[in-house]
């Protein structure tokens, strides 16, 4: 018998509460054990100015910012208005709540693609995940981006199964929402449109309507911010500038694709010279180069870097030229960036944990790979769950990457990891759900999942 609405909300709230407490507890344990730089980007400064009514700027009366997406600073600004500026406790609790929402989405994804045991265990494992919990402490966009990105995946799961245009519209809207947190997510839009059209290739009219639904929803969500940017610049900037610069910086063989403060002084000086050569080709280069390259050379992660539309285009052109002139070196550099995406710590002060991270990530990815290999070959499983992982991995291998950028794929890899863990325990004659989640089978969570599968079969 299907659960009524109140019972559904009861089980969702139970999972949310459990994962909220686990995530906040793990984050506090990390904070008490190791030094954590909380405000490590200009997000907090933008949020403070938003809360004071100065607008989307890094400092009062400063130039309007184009190189950061608006959603995360707006999230922080709301917290600052409610609980005071730079309130670390409020940010921790709010981002723990975001992570708990992500855990609820993981429960849905795992249950729909596998069963309720995988869904429940995956949600709990995500709440306990130390790497993801580390970013719960910091004033960075990972918790919010992970939530919206996972919501887009959950909607994509539902859309593939139901094939309803309204659900595909939700996918497009959530992709746009994720892009307003981090512009890199916008690349998922054409990827999922193509994947949806391929899935519906035998129904061309339906495929066209689905593609239009996703695209219209995505554009509607993005349009207000794009209009704001057009009024500022007179040019089309959908979310933010900086994509061209990211591609250029990530493909500089002189710095091995690293940022300024990851390299030594001599390499940093060489990067400054290369940057100056690119900036000299843009309009207003005298203004861009005035005062040297201090705005690029600072080793502080909180140093604002204003990137105009013209500068970003110049960097984009220079990046493709660099790749075309050194294809073999660029390919090798991309391979190294794949390693950084999964294993490399960014902050030099935290490099003491590098070995632990490598061991932990290798074990997690090995279990995830085993989970992928153990499931039945179902096309929707590969398209639905692997495509977002492959997309983010590829985009950061092309630009620049550290382990921080792999955090948004932790929810999906956790689902696969749980499937791999169950394969191992079953091989030993055990069951991953025999003890730890037996109580869940007697609770509304298990009943909801069972009733859902009965309706689908």
Image (spheres, rainbow, N blue to C red):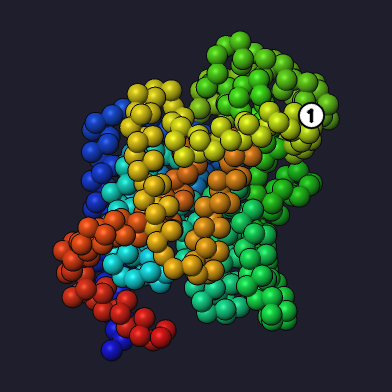
Residue depicted at 46% across the width and 40% down the height: 342
Residue appearing at x 52%, y 22% in the figure: 262
**Which of the image's four quarters has the C terminus?**
bottom left
Q: Residue at horizontal 78%, vertical 47%?
A: 235
Residue nearer the viewer, 294 or 387: 387
Q: Residue furthest top?
A: 266
Residue at x 42%, y 39% (from the top left corner): 139
Secondary structure of the residue carrying tag 1 is helix
- Asked whether the viewer can see residue 115, the reply is yes
Numbered circles on residues, count? 1
Residue 23 image offset from top left, x and y in percent = 28, 49
| Visible residue check, residue 43 | no
For the N terminus, the quadrant is bottom left
Pointer 1 local density, CA inside 10 Å: few below 14, some 14–19, many at least 20: few
On screen, residue 431 versus residue 409, left or right, reads left
Q: Position of residue 403 (x, y in %)?
A: 46, 37
Q: Position of residue 200 (x, y in %)?
A: 65, 76
Above or below 375: residue 397: above
Lateral position of residue 206 relative to residue 142, left or right: right
Q: Front-most of 452 and 422? A: 422
Q: Is residue 310 above or below residue 270?
A: below
Residue beneath disc 1: 325
- Which image quarter: residue 20? bottom left
Q: Viewed as shown, does residue 386 lie left or right of 36?
A: right
Q: Is residue 8 above or below residue 102?
A: below
Question: Along the horizontal axis of the image, is 289 left or right of 435?
Answer: right
The percent coordinates of residue 62 (x first, y second) are 62, 33
Q: Is residue 73 above or below residue 60?
A: below
């Amino acid at each position: 018998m299907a659960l009524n609405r109140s019972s559904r909300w009861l089980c969702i709230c139970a999972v949310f509460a459990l994962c909220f407490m686990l995530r906040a507890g793990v984050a506090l344990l990390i904070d008490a054990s190791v030094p954590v730089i909380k405000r490590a980007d200009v997000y907090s400064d933008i949020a403070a100015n938003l809360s004071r009514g100065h607008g989307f700027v890094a400092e009062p009366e400063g130039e309007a910012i184009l190189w950061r997406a608006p959603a995360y600073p707006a999230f922080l600004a709301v917290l600052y208005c409610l609980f005071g500026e730079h309130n670390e406790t409020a940010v921790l609790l709010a981002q723990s709540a975001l992570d708990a929402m992500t855990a609820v989405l993981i429960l849905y994804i795992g249950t729909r693609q596998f069963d309720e045991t995988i869904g429940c265990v995956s949600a709990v494992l995500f709440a306990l995940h130390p790497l993801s919990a580390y970013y719960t402490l910091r004033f960075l966009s990972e918790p919010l981006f992970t939530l919206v990105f996972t919501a887009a995946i959950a909607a994509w799961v539902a859309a593939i199964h139901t094939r309803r245009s309204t659900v595909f519209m939700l996918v497009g809207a959530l992709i746009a929402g994720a892009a307003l947190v981090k512009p890199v997510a916008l690349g998922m839009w054409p990827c999922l449109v193509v994947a949806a059209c391929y899935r519906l290739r035998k129904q061309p009219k339906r495929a066209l309507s689905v593609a239009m639904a996703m695209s219209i929803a995505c554009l509607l969500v993005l349009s207000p911010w794009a209009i704001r940017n057009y009024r500022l610049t007179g040019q089309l900037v959908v979310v933010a500038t900086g994509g061209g610069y990211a591609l250029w910086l990530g493909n500089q063989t002189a710095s091995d694709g690293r940022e300024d403060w990851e390299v030594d002084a001599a390499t940093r000086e060489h990067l400054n010279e290369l940057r100056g050569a690119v900036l000299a080709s843009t309009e207003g280069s005298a203004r861009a180069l005035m005062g040297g390259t201090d705005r690029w050379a600072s080793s502080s992660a909180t140093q604002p870097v204003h990137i105009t539309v013209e500068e970003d285009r110049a960097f984009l052109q220079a990046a493709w030229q660099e790749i075309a002139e050194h294809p073999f070196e660029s390919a090798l550099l991309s391979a190294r960036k794949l390693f950084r995406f999964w294993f490399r710590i960014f902050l030099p002060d935290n490099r003491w944990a590098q070995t632990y991270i490598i061991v932990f990530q290798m074990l997690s990815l090995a279990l995830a790979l085993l989970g992928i290999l153990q499931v039945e070959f179902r096309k929707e499983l590969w398209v639905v769950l692997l495509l977002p992982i492959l997309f983010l991995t590829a985009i950061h291998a092309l630009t620049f990457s550290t382990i921080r950028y792999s955090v948004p794929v932790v929810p999906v890899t956790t689902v696969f990891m749980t499937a791999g863990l169950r394969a191992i325990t079953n091989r030993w004659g055990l069951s991953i759900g025999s003890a730890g989640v037996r109580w869940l089978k007697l609770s509304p969570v298990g009943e909801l999942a069972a009733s859902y599968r009965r309706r689908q079969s």
